[in-house]
Amino acid sequence: MSQLSEELKEYLKETNQYEHVVTLLYWDMKTGTPKLGQAGHIDAVTYFSAKEFARNTSEKLGELLEGLSAPAEYDALDDTWKFIVRRMKRDFDRNRRIPPEVYEAYVREQAESGRAWEEAKNASDFSIFAPHLKKMIERTKEITGYTDPGREVYDALLNQYEEGMDSATIDRLFNDLKKDLVPLIQKILAAPQPDDAAFHQSFDLDAQRKVQRMLLDYIGFRRDAGTVGETEHPFTLNFCSKDVRVTNHFHEREPLSAIFSAIHEGGHAIFEQNINPEYDGTVAGSCTYMGVHESQSRFYENILGRNKNFWIPVYDKLKTLLPQLQKVSPDEFYREINHVRNSMIRTEADEVTYCMHIILRYEMEKAIFRDGITVEDLPALWNQKMQEYLQITPASDAEGILQDMHWSDGSFGYFPSYLLGSIYDGMFLEALEEELGSIDSLLADGRIGEITKWLNEKIHQYGSTRLPAEVIRNVCRKEVSAKPLIRYFTEKYTAVYGL
Ligand code: ZN
């Protein structure tokens, strides 16, 4: 190791102390801080984030990265550190191009916009949020002009959440899906639907917490490197591969919601826990590609969790913890966890109609950044697309365009990641079955550990060091395609609904 690379390591070590504190404060704010204590925590988070940002954009760091990018230094680095230097240099240059006063204004506007969105959602009144949304769109265009000069704005945004992805590829993938899914969904909705009364009785919340524990253990979440909290919106947060935390929500009459959130966040966590520990504390660790990340949470939630065989080894345990299910047969349980409904809310959607919720948002974002649609016209476009894709029209903006918070803090281009994740899953499932055999028998035989090990080896261990397209090519030896996912949906739901 050269002197410069030792210096960079030392520098990172100190920066990580700030990040560690910010992460811990954030966790505490979400899971334990009392209402009156929030303001003090926000002050502390702001203080430590500013310190961290200053270190990440300092002259000193710039010199270190510049020095390490010179051929004599760079060539002497191992592959991991080559990646780290390249990635840090890119992010450094990007961040330094944003004028500090623009960044500061953006942070403040994000907070104001978030508050306005909440108020608008509670009042179901889009006009409260509209001026802030307009500001977020303008500011996003401005900042993207600094971070990605010369690049078309929406493609630059997509690339920020799923590196290497662009709208031409997503157009192809989503159009393929749309063509086959719209008629499939119509057929499913016309078929007889299961009776779901047994799933909406009163379920003890503590029993639901025990179910979460049981499921996390079952899928391979490591308790010595992870813990669990409760929040209204479930999420996963990590310090490093040795400390990964998930949250869940519990509703008395919706036990399936907690069950599938537990598996989903568990999937995110298993990914993070199995990244090469040598990457901890660097940009090589913690996967920053949202499509790839969602592919893992959704693989556990949907491909595994909504498979009948997943439940065979644990169904008795589940019935012991939730005695209301004593009279529900495994077949009835399977039917309900794959109950397709045309509902208004994305986060409550089944795995099939979920795709249409994302395609709608993707098309809306393109309308904003490509076609320059005015903010005032957005609710009508939303409602028109809901009618076209799911044959329902929101009764209010709260259950329409105001339902998600993403646009309120300027996270444009994030939504497609969820569906890219499912598209990758279709491909991963094919590759996995070619190598390990039928997933049905693996699950039925209680060999889920072999599936997790396969995902660890093929995907998780690499963290951020492999770009999404490289992950796909290495696991599947093919270019990305929606065909496997379409095949999976068609075969599964033809059988479930007897189409
Ligand atoms: Zn997720």
Image (cartoon, helix red, strand yellow):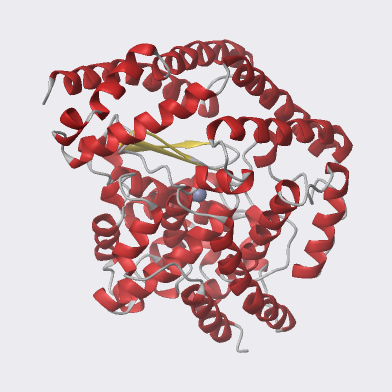
The residue shown at (70%, 53%) is 366
> Please, is residue 149 above or below residue 307 in the view?
above
Seen from the viewer's position, the closer of residues 482 and 469 is 469
> Please, is residue 113 above or below residue 447 in the view?
above
> Please, is residue 134 above or below residue 211 in the view?
above
Q: Position of residue 183 (x, y in %)?
A: 69, 81
- In this view, the residue farthest toward the bottom is 499
> Please, is residue 126 above or below residue 350 in the view?
above
Seen from the viewer's position, the closer of residues 377 and 211 is 377
Q: Position of residue 442 (x, y in %)?
A: 29, 74
Point out the image quarter for the N terminus. top left
Is residue 443 at all visible to an observer of this figure?
Answer: no
Task: Give residue 125's quadrant in the image.
Answer: top right
The residue shown at (84%, 47%) is 397
| Relative horizontal placement of residue 339, taking residue 313 as reference (left or right) | right
Seen from the viewer's position, the closer of residues 88 and 327 is 88
Total marks in image: 0
Q: Position of residue 230 (x, y in %)?
A: 52, 37
